[in-house]
Amino acid sequence: MNFEQLVGEQLKTMDKLLYLQSEIERCQDIKKQLIALQDEAKVLSVQEEIEQMKIELNRIQEVFEQQTEEVIRTYENQRFETVS
């Protein structure tokens, strides 16, 4: 992949990160509302969903970090090739 493609992929990953973070926040708000209503069964269900999303968020963050390293390597290689 070239630099532009890598950056494009990284932007897609960033979109996934932002979406998942907003979903976690939304579920946490729902959880607070359910706690206020004392609906323990639904609280547990929402908490499980939050935990699964956090696991997915961590996985996507790892992918993003790997993509960042690849973007940097590719950029440096292109810059080196241009100078040579």
Image (cartoon, rainbow, N blue to C red):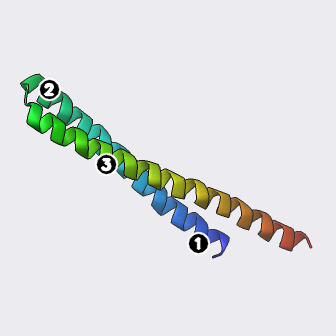
| Mark 3 closeness class: few <14, some 14–19, many ≥20 residues within 10 Å | few
| Mark 2 closeness class: few <14, some 14–19, many ≥20 residues within 10 Å | some
- Tell me where residue 31 sits by quadrant: top left
In this rendering, would 71 be left or right of 32?
right
According to the picture, the residue beneath numbered tag 1 turns out to be: 5
Q: Is mark 1 on a helix, strand or loop?
A: helix
According to the picture, the residue beneath numbered tag 3 turns out to be: 52
In this rendering, would 74 be left or right of 33?
right
Q: What element carries label 3?
A: helix
Can you tell which mark lies on residue 35? 2
Marks 1/3: CA–CA distance: 30 Å
Residue that sits furthest to the right in the current view: 84
Which of the two labelled residues, at mark 1 and mark 3, occupies the earlier sequence position?
Answer: 1
Residue at position x 36%, y 51% from top? 19
Q: Where is residue 43 in the image (x, y as percent from the top left)?
A: 15, 34
Residue at position x 59%, y 64% from top? 7
**Tag 2: amino acid:** Ile
Q: Which quarter of the rendered picture does the N terminus lie within?
A: bottom right
Marks 2/3: CA–CA distance: 19 Å
Q: Is residue 79 above or below residue 43?
A: below
Q: Position of residue 76 (x, y in %)?
A: 78, 63
